[in-house]
Image (cartoon, helix red, strand yellow):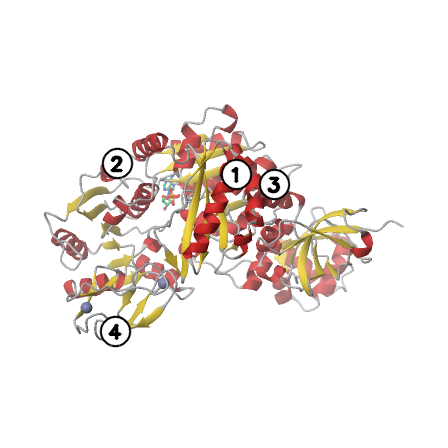
Amino acid sequence: MSQTIFNIALDVPLNRTFDYLSGGFIARVGNRVVVPFAGRNLVGVVLEIKQTSDYPIEKLKPVSHVFDDVVFDSHTLKLLKFCADYYHYPLGQALISALPLRLRQIKPAVSRKQFAYQLLPNADISQIPARKVVLHRVIAALQATPVLAASELAFITFGWHKAILELKNLGLVSEHEVVAVKAFMPISTTEPILNDEQVSAIQNVLVLTHIFKPWLLHGITGSGKTEVYIQILRKILQPILKQPQAQVLVLVPEINLTPQLEARFRSRLSQYPLVTLHSNLSESERLQNWLAASTGAAKIVIGTRLSVFTPMPHLKLIVMDEEHDGSYKQQDGMRYHARDVAMVRAKQLNIPIILGSATPSLETWHNSTQNKTQKNQYGLLSLKQRAVENAALPNIFCIDTAKSPTENGLSPLLVNALRERLKRGEQSLLFINRRGYAPVLYCNACQWVAPCMRCSARLVVHLSKKRLECHHCGHEQKIPLQCPSCGNADLHPTGQATQRLEQTLQTLLPTAHIARVDRDSMRNKDALTDLLTQVHNQEIDILVGTQMLAKGHDFPHLTLVGVIDTDSALYSPDFRASERLFAQLMQVSGRAGRAKKAGEVLIQTAFPQHALFDALRSQDYVSFANAQLQERSVMQFPPVSYFALLRAEANDYAQVQQFLNLAGNLARELKQDVMIYDPVRPQMERLKGMERGQLLLQANSRVALQRLLKNWMPQCRELPIATKVRWSLDIDPLEF
Ligand code: ADP
Ligand code: ZN
Ligand code: ZN
């Protein structure tokens, strides 16, 4: 007798899938199931339904349960299979971690579906007898407002539910699923008149909506990129004959940092159900939103990197805003890059994808300008002007700290500029990428600095809490009263960070209303939204903050940006440091002069002649990017070559070294066109008490690299030492 067998992916760190008997259950591919595994129950996903197994049937166990909430559609499964392959990560773990937490648990997913009702055109109401008062009441309501949600009908009349059922049976009313609309900060919905560059960008994209086509929308900050997305979305979502079902996915770096963006999409595309997916949602919200996307009820999904894996049955377009942003890279588990995954997804679905940025990643810039093969060439769309009339780009100047020395982190020139803005009732922003009070606690007598015992890092002074904190492992301790090394009681917080700068400013400018924005001050979920409202109401004069402030915010009254301390990044050993710094400074500069008031950016630096500042002053991304690409090409660094990094850590570095050495030898024996470096220690040698090491692989082609990895990874797993160290593979690593 033939048996039905399910091939199932499980959340276990093994590079294989598992066969189970159906146990009389009926399932579809993509369904969630519960199975017994090693003495416990696990949630799995059905990958295949078949009649035979490579294992003896009598040894197979039956599944314990099948949830009939359809989970992964075939496209999403295919995408995750590709990723598991490309990132050399167990498929089961990739699949399960792409699910909202609630769906990883052994519980049915309860969908709180909501429905809305609509009177059908040509509905013949005369057939309803006059005595059916409730029916007439519902019809009257539907005549007054064409679409009513169940919750709205409940307000209108008692007994609405029965009435609706009856009207549906009579064929007078249609029902469809709706997505609950969240409250949001209302935003002006006026339609701007598009400028020529915007019109041309939109037209270009809309000509090719039914094939895979990557676009780079390169537009300076404030050039109206978001406006372009909105107009393209509107056209794609517009129900047209034969294809009434479009959905779009909008990927953003960190949505909780840009509540304005969500509000803008909601206001301008209010007719389309929109859900968000990000880490600031409650687990039940996340589940509901995910389900709404996967049933097709939500037409617009705005989400952070993980949402690139959300099933969307009618996906017709992917937009990735701020595509250069580092937060698109997952830094643990399956270390995917959402941009690359989105590209694969668009290709699989044969749909367009738009990457937007003022400072595109060099990978994307390379693909848009230097890729020879026509097939993979990205279309380049440029917006060179600021969209708002008369809003010019800010003027950028360097303050030479050798000539105008800083006092408590601030040069007199910058203080004067702040004072000036205060007098004129304009706002300023001071950007410093370090939270806390001071980065170092220092003993003048013996040069001791407070170290983290678990990391190769210094402890940061948090004066308000009277504590020292490690920003890498979270370790906290009291500020010592005297130097543990020499007993000196005179310990100095040294260097600048947000809290100290805030304090200094308050002393220098006692009348100013100053607000600090960093992860400490913005712990509360709504804190940032509240603060942004205050800024818009001009209740704040000076903002002091980290890169949380750099992203996407529109501050019409802000005319000055001061940049405090970026010099360490200018000469960093990381070959991507310049690219990141340039993007960050362009972005933070873009906060100034967004409306009709001219903006000014002052950068304090000891290296005003640095080429990066030249490019920045002339706001010339193109020259900067081309020069960087030239350098990368000489050095044979990405994007002209491809990296993979084998990372390992253990309590004892000798084990790390042994593992990496053996792994390196195995790789060398495979003799592919791949360069294998010697193991080295990363800059952060110790993290959370673990000694770390890494081995870099470099190839001129992705194919060559993947070919090697495919043979090499199983060999690494087989190494006896592999179980004694914690190790992971990072394909296309961003950090070293
Ligand atoms: P970006 O996304 O490139 O930073 P936005 O789309 O946010 O730019 O546009 C910046 C500002 O300009 C917004 O306030 C937006 O409403 C406005 N804007 C966009 N396009 C136009 C236009 N064609 N005319 C006038 N204002 C515009
Ligand atoms: Zn000392
Ligand atoms: Zn630490």
On screen, residue 427 above or below 636: below
Question: Of label 1 and label 3, which has the lower sequence position?
Answer: 3
Q: Secondary structure at mark 2?
A: helix
Amino acid type at image mark 2? Ala
Q: Residue at x 62, y 45 (%)?
A: 76
Disc nearest the viewer among 2 and 3: 2
Q: Position of residue 126 (x, y in %)?
A: 76, 53
- The single residue placed furthest to the right in the displayed view is 1
Front one among 34 and 691: 691
Estimate the spatial distance between the alpha carbons at disc 1 and disc 2, rounded to whole Å: 30 Å
Question: Of label 4 and label 3, which has the lower sequence position?
Answer: 3
Determine whether label 4 and label 2 are within 8 Å by CB.
no
Q: Is mark 2 within 8 Å of ligand 1?
A: no
Q: Residues within 10 Å of mark 3 (few under 14, many from 20)?
A: few
Label drawn at residue 555: none
Residue beneath disc 4: 480
Label drawn at residue 239: 3
Residue beneath disc 1: 343
User: Where is residue 105, by image quadrant?
Assistant: bottom right
Amino acid type at image mark 1? Met
Q: Residues within 10 Å of mark 4 (few under 14, many from 20)?
A: some
| Number of numbered labels in the structure image | 4
